[in-house]
Amino acid sequence: MAATCVVHPMDVIKNRMQVQKGKASILNVISTTYSKEGILSFYNGLSAGLVRQASYTTVRLGTYNQMQEQRFVGRPNFAVLAFMAGTAGAVGAFFGTPADVALVRMTTDGRLPVEQRRNYKNVLDAFVRIVREEGIFTLWRGSVATIGRAIVVNVSQLATYSQMKHLIASRMNVKEGIGLHFGASMMSGFITAFNSMPFDIAKTRIQNMKTTDKPPGMVSVIMTIAKTEGIRSLWKGFWPTYCRIGPHTVLTLVINEQLMRLYRIY
């Protein structure tokens, strides 16, 4: 949640770029959002972002940390780390999907014509109105895409971080500390952003749809985007995504390491 307070504006920019069909530059999205809605619009949907972290990230980090605390004969290899991270991500994503739906809608609402805006007051208002207007299962719209993305993100982020930290410490003789955590998390942040983008843009498009019918599947959305907008569109908004995921990964994992250290001591 601390990391989200820092990087939320990039989430707003990323989501707006991803729902916009055709070319969209980061500078154009920033200038249009600022000129039409003001500086505070870059924190639209912050309450949903915080609830998402309180649900999704609490579960995924808690699950992954508990799995790592299990006794292994020797250090677990990357395949085991990937399995643990993927499992933790899938479980966390299921719990975090309702807040994710609210987050996508709240961060992209301002780009719609005034008469089409949902104008959710906060994340709780979003939950109540979604259930009342579209049914309770809409809170889990795009859950397959969200879980698929979460598996990719967590394998790329958590398993890669653990592996990178081990390699840097063993090969470069770097001692455990914030410097090691920072270096490993910067590397995992870039890998995470690149690997997750196609799933992320599919998830964003599905969750932003205004329909009470069954939404299309993740693979279908990815194929449609690639066919109609070009394969490179699957990485639309990459730099704001990296500018969000990079610092978010660093802050989340460094803070997590410090909290775990305090937990073990006290």
Image (cartoon, helix red, strand yellow):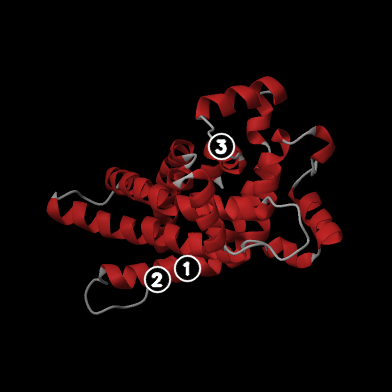
Q: How would you rate the neighbour count of disc 1 (Cα within 10 Å): few for under 14, some for 14-19, many for 20 or more?
A: many
Residue position for label 3: 22
SS at badge 3: loop
Q: Nearer the viewer, residue 149 or 161?
A: 149
- Which residue bears the numbered disc 2? 84
Left or right for 118, reference 186: right
Cα separation, mark 1 vs mark 3, equals: 35 Å
Q: Quadrant of the C terminus?
A: bottom left
Report which quarter residue 142 is drawn in: bottom right
At 48% from the left and 51% from the top, the residue drawn is 226
Q: Could you tell which of marks 2 and 3 lies nearer the N-terminus?
A: 3
- The outermost residue toward the front is 228
Query: Which element type, helix, strand or loop, lies under badge 1?
Result: helix
Mark 3 surroundings within 10 Å by alpha-carbon count, few (fewer than 14), some (14 through 19), many (20 or more): few
Element on which disc 2 rests:
helix
- Check residue 191 in the rendering and tell me which mark sits there, or answer none: none
